Image: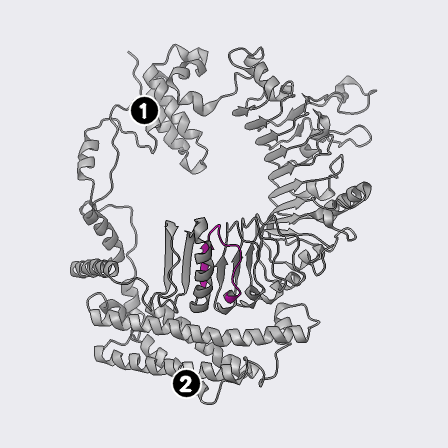
Amino acid sequence: MADAIVSAVLQQLLTIVDREAEQEVRLVVGVKKEVEKMRTTFQTIQAVLVDAEKRQFKEEAVRVWLGKLKHIYYDIDDVLDEWNTAILKSQIEGRHQTPSTDSSPLSQVYSCIPSPCSCFGGLALRRDIGVKIRELNERLQAISKEKDDFAFLVNTSDNDLESERPPKTTHFVDVSEIRGRDQDRDTVISIKILVTTRKADVATIMGCTQLLHLEKLSPDECWFLFSGIAFSGRAESDRDECRVMLASNAMEESTTDFYDENVRHLTSMRDRLEIPDPTYNLKKLRTLFLDEFLSFPGDKEILDVCLLKLFDQSTCLRVLYLRSKLIEKVPQEIGKLIHLRYLSLDECTGLRELPEALCDLCNLQTLNIKMCFGLESLPRGMEKLINLRHLGNGGTCGIRFMPEGMGRLTSLQTLDEFVVNESETDSCRLEDLGKFIHLRGHLTIRRLGNYAGEGGSEARLSTKLRSLGLDFNGGYDKEAQKAIEDEASLMQALEPPQHLRSLQIEYCKGIVFPFPNWMTLLTSLKSVTLIHCWNWESLPPMGKLRFLESLSIWDMRKVKKVGEEFLGVETKDGQTSTNNNIVAYFPNLKKLEFKGMHEWEEWEYELRNRGGDESCSSSSSTIPTIIMPKLQCLDIEGCPKLKKLPRHILQSRALQQLKIPYCDILYKRYDKEAGDDWPSISHIPQAMPQLTDRSKLPSIVDPVIRDTMDLKHLYQVAAVAVLCIQPEPSYRPLITDVLHSLIPLVPTELGGSLRVA
């Protein structure tokens, strides 16, 4: 630990010297020598850290010395970061004064560096930092001098490090190293048949009469396991001394004031948390997590005052996580947190605005404002956050536009939502998306209906995106036909990356989906969701997507019939020709959902004469078709007018799950107790419910073997089946384990080990 922080500060000191030489950024007279002296001292200290870290477990004085070293590292890191931040701010100001024609981020910064005399915030700031460096150097020299009192061994090779490496692992077990659960072990030995499972119902189905619940390990057993790993290769006395030290530290912390001046990291999570009193000395705090604090209405005024004082005092913060529904605005004083790298305000549902001072945090790398429903806008100076890499803004539905300068944040890797609103002055344009070449993961482009450009062909999306949402809401001031034409043009222009896996499209305005050419070319596309396209009268030809595995269609209010157009079947004028013996539609689809289609009445296909025109002979005019051969889950919800299921669903042998809630006609038709067509779906395994209900098990057994199986064996087979169909794949057993479990249940004449009397 100590070696790591010393290495880090040495790297920073080296960077300062290099920057001073390359960029003509000058400290006040004499401070360069102080920096060089500090670097030399740290190198001397680093040479003895291996021995010091070994001895800290036995010698309290050494542990205290290492603590001093850690704290001065933090203080030096703060001053050096302040120095770097001052330079960075000067460069940002220069960029605004003299725009560069080069679009690269580095050229935009460095081509605009002000003259050395004005750089670095002026003489007063440089003198202040110089004074801090001198004072820290004096403290460091004192700490370095103390090390001589301990007569540390100087590390001259890697031999000491080699001895600290953990031993190689092996599959052999040393019985002497096994500790704990002695009583449980004795109990297990007396059990002839052992079933291990996390679920009691599985054990019950297997016919277990005795359930053994493993209890927690004792403190001594926990310590044995922990120390065996943490102190591998060390003497037993070392372990005991460290245990005493940990216990004494825990007692000391419980009886002393938690908020002392050396607290660097603070996390508090309780049902009703009071924000730390600003009168405590929290000036050196670097990490603060406050979750669900001050959540009662009467706390609102207290919160505002405490936040203001906290930001005014804890200016060394690197990580700040705040979550409270009472936060309505963030104080301007947040601009004082110049070291901040991570700021999270997620689920602050009462938040209305972010201050412009937030944009002064030029070191900020992550801004998380997810689920801040009430937030109405982003600060207009967002472009100054030149180190921002991650903007988590999913669920900020109140934001109406993206500030114009955001197009300059070309290093963004995460952007949950991009809002289009070109009627807003100083807003970021859709074409600016082409500048975010490092975006990865998921992106939703909201309110595409507001787009007023020429097709959006310049809005090239990052090739690293794997999930994309296209929301065509907005544009309600447009003429209806113009809105539909713009929508079709944009759909073609917004070509996603080749390796896209998931696509969601919503709020289309036309009566049909403008199926883009690029859609069939996405060979990695596995999941598509279509939502709230209220004017569609038919569904798009999704059967053309050969690699699709999941399809969800929600809230299509005018669709009355789903037919061959859904499969992608076309007439002779546009027929997709094939020379195969079989045509497969949705060949890889596994999950299909229809929800909230209140006018949907019919679902059937007329697949006749697919091979050519009406004059073709019967031998060549009919091509066998397969529809959804791999479909496992069909969920139809809130479709009260749908009359029946199509033949390919009723005949499917792959289908494992069928759900039809709030579908009145279907429910009556396929009801097990009174439905006329229950037999047509009775083969679909309602897997989990029937397998875990012993009373229903005999009814789903194959009639050929129903009378040959003992109930006890049937329950055991069902328990194995339950394990095999668990939703979480990692919990499912290997096929070899399944076979070993079933062999005792198979008669000897069939290759098993069961002897039938």
Residue 537 visible in the snapshot = yes
Residue 315 visible in the snapshot = no
What residue range appears in magenta?
Answer: 318-333
- Alpha-carbon distance for marks 1 and 2? 74 Å
Please give left or right for residue 615 compared with residue 703 in the image. Answer: right
Dot in front, 1 or 2: 2
Judged from the image, the secondary structure of the residue bearing numbered disc 2 is: helix
Q: Amino acid at mark 1?
A: Thr
Please give left or right for residue 378 compared with residue 508 in the image. Answer: left
379 to 559, vertically: above or below: below
**Residue 91 vs residue 582, the one in the foreground:** 91
User: Dot 2: within a 10 Å radius of its alpha carbon, few (fewer than 14), some, or many (20 or more) residues?
Assistant: some
Image disc number at residue 677? none
Q: Specify the quadrant that holds the N terminus.
A: bottom left
Residue placed furthest toward the left: 237
The residue labelled by disc 1 is 204
Please give left or right for residue 562 compared with residue 286 in the image. Answer: right
The residue labelled by disc 2 is 34
Judged from the image, the secondary structure of the residue bearing numbered disc 1 is: helix
390 to 35, vertically: above or below: above
User: Dot 1: within a 10 Å radius of its alpha carbon, few (fewer than 14), some, or many (20 or more) residues?
Assistant: some
| Quarter of the rendering containing residue 718 | top left
**Residue 426 vs residue 747, the one in the foreground:** 426
Q: What residue is drawn where x is 53% and y is 76%? A: 86
465 to 717, vertically: above or below: below
| Quarter of the rendering containing residue 383 | bottom right
Of the numbered discs 1 and 2, the one sitting upstream in the chain is 2
Q: Specify the quadrant that holds the C terminus.
A: top left
Q: Amino acid at mark 2?
A: Glu
Where residue 238 appears, as percent x and y from the top left, is: 19, 61
Please give left or right for residue 187 compared with residue 630 in the image. Answer: left
